[in-house]
Amino acid sequence: MKRCYFLSDLHLETQYANFPYHLFESNTKDWLFIVGDTFTYLDKSIDCYYDFVLMLAYSFEKVFIVLGNHDYYGYTLRGGLNKLKFNLKKLKNVIVLDHTTQFQEQDIAIFGDTLWSNIPSQAESWIEGFGDFAQIKGTYASNLTVYETNDWNTDARKSLQLFLKSPAKTKIVLTHFPPFYINCGYPDSLSNYYFGNSGLEWEIDDFPDYWIYGHIHNQLCYHQMGCNFLTNPRGYGTEGKDLLLNYIEV
């Protein structure tokens, strides 16, 4: 039995000094999942982040990392991902996941990706007004565009469907963006399209055993379509004052 802890939205860029480090006592037989929005490349939080990950690498048997939207700030999507992989490559028990990589050990298989929201055309200009699209560099333009995030979303969904055909006994999916529009906070606004994904329930025949995600700063735990969906965000300010190191056992 493997115990797997999970967290998201730690936002070290705003609150590194008062982070509850006592949560990370030595758990050298356990795994840790961090599913995005931990730092930015725009400030000194990236240096704090490397120290933070080094501490985690000594505390856990394995650490799995998925990037969130904030984690790309200052770079292109590919550039930010490659930089993080390069800088952490000496930590052999730290695994940075994206839709081009998967992890499997014995009967446990893990898929991880940012899984950007798929944005419809009617919301494109509205969503591109979000700060993320000014802070992240574009591959085809000076700034990130919905065209590019939708392209990444398409690739991730294709890879996810292939992963879910794995014969592994236990399948775990880690994404930053939510798989559905649940408790998004913007039910009557175009902003809602940036806080979930549409159509996955029709695309996926066999959901994983666990799907852990972030982006929304709400504690959620629900079961549908044979899958356990879980969040455990810290968020900003006092949002995470009662943060616990939640876990699953597989």
Image (tube, rainbow, N blue to C red):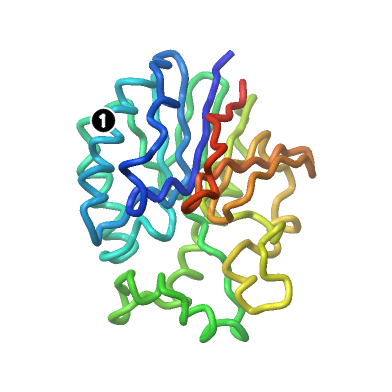
Coordinates of residue 68 in the picture (x, y in percent)? 43, 54
Q: Which part of the image, by quadrant, shows the C terminus?
A: top right
Q: Residue 103 or 121: which is nearer the viewer?
A: 121
Is 110 above or below relative to 10?
above
Instruction: Name the residue located 52 percent from the left edge and 56 percent from the top edge.
Output: 115
For residue 55, what is the image quadrant?
Answer: top left
88 relative to 105 in the view: left or right: left
Pick whichever, 22 or 157, lies toward us: 22
Q: Is residue 100 above or below residue 1?
A: below
Between residue 10 and residue 162, name the one nearer to us. Answer: 10
Residue ID at (26%, 30%): 54
120 vs 101, left or right, is right
Image coords of residue 204 (percent x, y): 70, 51
* Quadrant of residue 89 within the rendered picture: top left
Q: Which residue is drawn at the image coordinates 40% and 50% (left, top)?
A: 11
Around disc 1, counting alpha carbons within 10 Å, would you say few (fewer than 14), some (14 to 19), or many (20 or more)?
some
From the top left corner, tell me how far across and down residue 14 is, in percent. Answer: 35, 54
Q: Is residue 221 something that shows in the picture? A: yes
Which residue is depicted at the point 23% across and 36% down?
51
Query: In this figure, what is the number of numbered marks?
Result: 1
Quadrant where the N terminus sits is top right
Residue that badge 1 annotates: 54
Q: Is residue 114 left or right of residue 195?
A: left
Q: Is residue 198 left or right of residue 213?
A: right
Kind of residue indicated by mark 1: Leu
User: Helix or strand or loop: what does disc 1 sit on?
Assistant: helix
Q: Is residue 250 visible?
A: no
Up-down relation of residue 80 to residue 1 (above or below)? below
The quadrant holding residue 178 is: bottom right
